[in-house]
Structures are given as structure tokens and as C-alpha cells.
Image (cartoon, coloured by chain):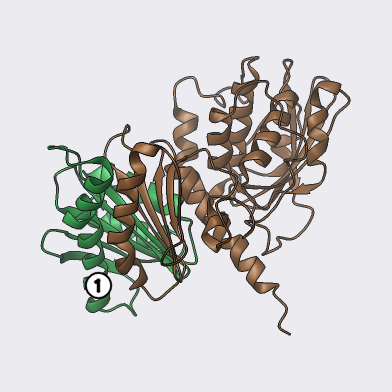
Amino acid sequence: MGNASQFDSPGVVGVDSPADLQRMIGRLSAPGSHFSDGARQVSVDSVELCLCLLDEFDEVVMARRLALWNSRGDRLTVELRNRRLHQADFSSTCDEAAAAAQFSASSLSYAGAETLQAFLFALRAFCAPGGIWVRSSRAGSPADPDETGVSVGTLRYQLAQAPAGVAPEAGKTELKPPSSESGAGRSVLAGFIANDPPWLEAWVLVAGALDREAGGRADRLAGLSEALDAVCNRLAARGSQPTAVFLEATGELGEHLAFVADGPERLALLVSPSGKGAFLAHWSDWRRACNASMATVAIP
Amino acid sequence: MSLVEEMSRLHRELPGCRSVLFGDAGTGIVLRACADADLRQEDHDSCMADAADWLGPEAERLRALVFGASPGSAPVAEAILLDGVELRVFRRFGEASCDVICVRSDNGATAELVSAAVQQLVQTDG
């Protein structure tokens, strides 16, 4: 299971995830499984086709390169590792998929909301009726430790949030790490909420004794601010920085709370009920981006 | 598979997993531990104390500050503590239960993966 030869026949989509055998078996034995007859049956709906592709991405643990073609002859090449999308390269013959060009040979290194929406817009344009063919091979380049990639959970969440048929605005698709100059202010933690992630419902940022900023749902800001004051010392007591705590609400309808501390800065977040996975993926991406930027600071 | 077997499997198979604890968040007592050999009882106690802290009354107070004091509001189901070194996931077995699973992991699996694994364990044995 999971070798390259499985993918050599057009129309056959396989899974390369020996580490997750139990889940794989579950999928194979499920009634109506896409894989039960050896070929994936998908509807003509582009969103569903996107979700099917993301399912496949989610199965890839070892580094792989997938080359995909649609019925128009457009080609998408992706590099995947550890269930994360690292590179996407579109080549399209169709004007409708012009947005795809923005991702040519791009390394996806930060889960910026606009970037992902632009990618998913291009992916939807790629997922045209008529089927998709896939071929798998080993990844072309060794893993770069500075590459963060984007988790499939984040992509799936963004796909659910993105309005159909809305193209990303021009000039908003540049891949950027969190910047201290963007977002809510000039602090490091402002980078965490830069680009207004869709899972974020409200936030309060304390960057100093008197410097307090807030955004999002007005009815929650006072409470968030109070909670942030209450939790400050407990987070600061932990030696390692930055530190975050995520408090998951019971049930599916409750919003989650999260608090982040980094040196003197504090951030309180109200996370949407379905935003847990996206928040955790965002934290991982942000930490890696921070580590990468710290590693490249020149010492005078 | 028994809870202990599930805990042992999790400790063995989850990348970077240092310890899997089962205990009572109300009293802070560790009832069962599957852990790396270099971890001591004090480490387990500290982890369970974190669980009691972030799943207990203090967490409820934080939620009450944000959402208001609504009687009968559900308690925090899971707390995830993340820092640059390691992550700790604490999860209740049920809404009103003091039984918790604590997983401590470093430099291995992502928080999403650890959380999903703990959730699966709790659903299996809950």
C-alpha cells in the first residue's frame, strides 16, 4: 500500500500514509467508501472535489510530489510532507484559472488568510467537471527546516469559509511571515492576529502598561480584557516564551478562549466554535515563522 | 483494549510523547502514568496540577468573565498548554467528570494531532 506505482493509472487516487493505518482501514471499510472499487468517485461539484483532494493531501505523511491534471489540461503540482502542503505550482491554459498563476512555484510558508483564499480560489478553478488525474512521485527537494507549509486542516477550514466564486484581491497574495508592522499594532503578538484570521471572533492585545488594543465582537471585549488581566500572571509564571493556553468549550456551539503571552505582551482571543484546528495550526505556523526569523537575525 | 493499554499505546505511538497520565483533577492525584523513564513522580504531579488549574474553577472563572455567569454553563472540556518547548493537553472524560487524561509531548506531534489522539482515547474509554 502506498507506493508510487498505484498512482500511475489515470483516475486512480491512492493514499501514501503508512503511519495512519487504522484511519486508512476505517476509510476503506466504510460504506460507500471512495476507495472501495479502487477509484475515487467524485461529484462534479468543485467544492466537493476540492475537499476530496484535501483528504488526499491529509493522508500524506512522507514527503511526496503529486502531479494533478484536470480535463482541460491544466496542471497542478503540489509538494506535501507531514500532512502539510508546502508548495503548489499551477499551470493553466484557461483564463478562468488565471488566479492560479499567482501560485506558480510558490513556497507556502505562512497561513495568511488572503493567501489561502487565493490558493483555494485557484484550486476551485482547477477542480473542473470531468475528473482529475493524479500521479505521485518522491518529493523533488529535501525538506527545508525553515519551510512551515500549511496544514490541511487550515485549508479545509478556509475552503468552508471562503465564498464561492470570489477572486482574491490583487496584491494580497504575497506570502509573508507575521510582521510587527502589520495588523493590530507594532508588537510581536500583533503578528499572530495579522491578516484577521477567520477563526478569530474577538481579541484584546496588551503591549505595555497603558497600550491596550482590541477588535472583533464588541459584546465580548470587556470580558476578554478582564480575563486577560486575570490570567496574565499565571502565563507569565511559565518560564518559556511565548506561551499559549487554549480552553476548549464543551459542546459544539461554544466559543473557545485562548491566551498568549510573549515577554511583556499579552493577547486574549475568542475563537469561533469550529476554529480549534485552525487556531492550533496557526500557532504551529506562527511559532515556526518566529523561529525562522529569529534564526536569520544577523548579529552585528 | 483497557484504558491502561490505550494509554500505553498512545505513549508508544505518539511522536514526541513524554507521558500519558490518568488522574483526578479535583484532588490533583495521579492514578496511572505511562511515561518516559527519566520523568519522576514530581513531574507527573506538576502536570496534574496544571490540569487541575486549567480545567478547574479558575478556568470556569475565566469563561464566566467573558460569557457571563450563566448557571449550568458547561465546563471547559479540554485545555492545551503550548510553549516553545513542549505542549500539554488535558481533557476531561465527561462534562462533569473530574477524571482527566494529561498528555505531555515535546518536539514531536503537532498540537492538533495530540489533541485528536487524546479525544479519541477519551471517546473510546469514556
Query: Disc 1 designates what residue?
Result: B46
Say which of B62 and A136 sits in front: B62
Residue A217 x/y as whole percent: 41, 37
Instruction: From the viewer's perspective, tell me whether residue B124 is left or right of residue A133.
Output: left
Query: Callout 1: residue from which chain?
Result: B
Quadrant where the image shows the C terminus of chain A: bottom right
Quadrant where the image shows the N terminus of chain A: top right
Assign a secondary structure to mark 1. helix
Chain letter for the part of the structure drawn in green: B
Residue A90 x/y as whole percent: 81, 36
Regarding residue A55, the answer to whether it shows in the image is no
Say which of A215 and A74 sits in front: A215
Quarter location, residue A287: bottom right
Chain A tint as drawn: brown
Asked if A136 appears above or below B117 in the picture, the reply is: above
Instruction: From the viewer's perspective, tell me whether residue B82 is left or right of residue A156.
Output: left
Asked if B53 appears above or below A9 in the picture, the reply is: below
